Image (tube, rainbow, N blue to C red):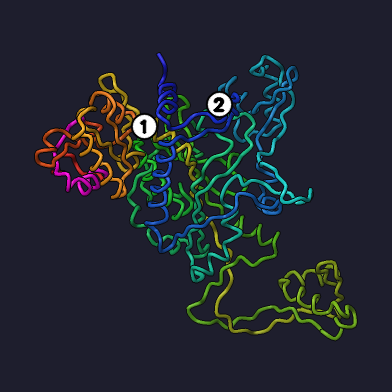
Amino acid sequence: MSDLYEKISDLAKRRGFFWPSYEIYGGVSGFYDLGPYGVLLKQRIIEKWRELFVRNHQEYVVELESPLIAPSVVFEASGHVEHFTDPIVTCKGTGRRYRADHLIEEALGISAEGMSTEEMSKLLRERGVKCPDGGEPGEVTTFNLLFKTQIGPYEGDVGYLRPELAQGMFVAFKRVLEAMRNKLPLGIAQIGRVGRNEISPRQAMIRLREFTIMEMEYFVDPEDRDGSCPFFEERAGTRLRILSYDAKAKGGEPQSFTVEEAVMEKVIVDKCLAYWMAVGQEFVEALGVPRHEILFVEKGPGERAHYSSQTFDQVVRTSRWGWVEVAGHSYRGDYDLSRHMSYSKADLTVFKQYREPLNVRVKKVMVDKGALGRLFREKTMEVFSRLQSLPAEVVEEQLAKEGKVTVDGYQVPKEAVRIEEVEEKVTGKKVVPHVVEPSFGGDRALYVAFEYAYREKEGRVILAFPRDLAPVQAAVLPLLENDEELIRTAREIYKALVREGFYVIYDDNGSIGRRYARTDELGVPAAITVDYKTLEDRTVTIRDRDSWNQVRVRAEDLPSALKKFLRGAPLESLP
């Protein structure tokens, strides 16, 4: 008997939700098409994410769209060129390549996450692990997952397809900050396609080479962590199931914490991180996943991405693959903005105004322009500007150690530059914001919603999507397929619902029972039947997909009744 995944795959292909791409050429692993109903389902999932993360927090969170491709320097600054890798092993016999950590996990039943390439190579040798084709694995190396490309006609202009959305938001941070009146906290959200050149993608829709991410970078004042999350109390009592890294290392079980408890007990390092995890839980529940099937698993020091101070994987239990990550929640600190400031020399700080100006003694770089002019002539102003941009502490240290200051290749002797301490009235200071990041996989969310919607009832298949996520909201069905008056009336009702903005299908082919079955398979919440009583009194029946119960409503009230029903109103409340 086929398992749930196989049933889902068959239904998804047959009913136009998703299937492997390029099938007529044999397919390419890691790529999937979304069919007509898959596109509609994904759009609703995206809108639900946007509602919870952006629209409900619009005072603080805005949306951005940035390019798919970025110049190499962006990913050098972010650390992806150096760190965005997976362990790879080449089979000595066939030359085929495999994920080394996957080989270890499948052959030995242990997690290789956090192991070095040397540790994995040693383990493969000592335990006699073979490749799937029976060959002997070679030494483990690393493989960079960035898709490399060329920008324009010149070979030196290297670019990369973005593997995440974050960098577009970091490099545009100052522009967005200015547009939003230079105020923290500030969330920048983005929804878009990304690419990762996975070594051996498996797990169908779970691991793709091209997919959609829904991500937010939430910028906070590092000196005012409490004030950075003004809506914390709204979810302080929400309970999260958390498996901490320490508990996981000791073989412990997940524990339940309120958001407030998790912060107070330092299970979660930051209020904002905890808050957005609670919003993330609500989002996954809105996909139809029960809370007891959602878990937050903390990653250890060797497991976290290079930019993270703390990361939780938000995982959901699936039928074939067990616990699958649908989101990552990270505290990124000031890593990203600091790196981009270092590489670009741009100022990505935020000016923090004091309530009252302060009189402080500060060190300042003092330059003798006359001495500078005699040394550098036409380059004088350029060197002067460079010196002025250096922190006084850096200049002081160079003068003490070397008796000169080197700036962009120019060597300035101590006779031309000195450090003085002066008193200034200071109205504020610059801070580098810290960042909290919730990041969701759109295609994984779609698959999870599909799996949790799948039902079988009396030999029929039902996709019981939450009503507000259903790709098609209603079906209009004349009772008989060959009665012209019923068909004409049903068509009028169908067109009226379309004009009201609903996604509706019309079906007059076959028996009414077969048509009900087809709408259930598509996950349509409401089937509207036009019968002979409709011709008498202009009432129609609304059939509930999940209970198969029906009520009659007046045709003129149908749009408002349907809106109520899709928002969760009981069927019995509609007449």
* 406 lies above or below 106: below
Q: Residue at x 85, y 72 (%)?
A: 404
Which SS class for mark 1? helix
The boundaries of the magenta stretch are: 548-566
Task: Look at the image and tell me in which quarter the C terminus lies.
Answer: top left
Residue 116 image offset from top left, x and y in percent: 68, 34
Instruction: Kindly indicate the quadrant of the structure image that contains residue 572.
Output: top left
Q: With 502 as the anchor, is 424 left or right in this view?
A: right
Q: With 402 as the anchor, is 327 left or right in this view?
A: left
Q: Main secondary structure of the magenta part?
A: helix
Dot 1: few (<14), some (14–19), or many (≥20) neighbours within 10 Å?
some
Nearer to us in this view, 405 or 60? 60
- Observer able to see residue 275: no
Specify the label residue 452 is tagged with: 1
- Residue type at mark 2 is Glu
Q: Residue at x 51, y 57 (%)?
A: 64
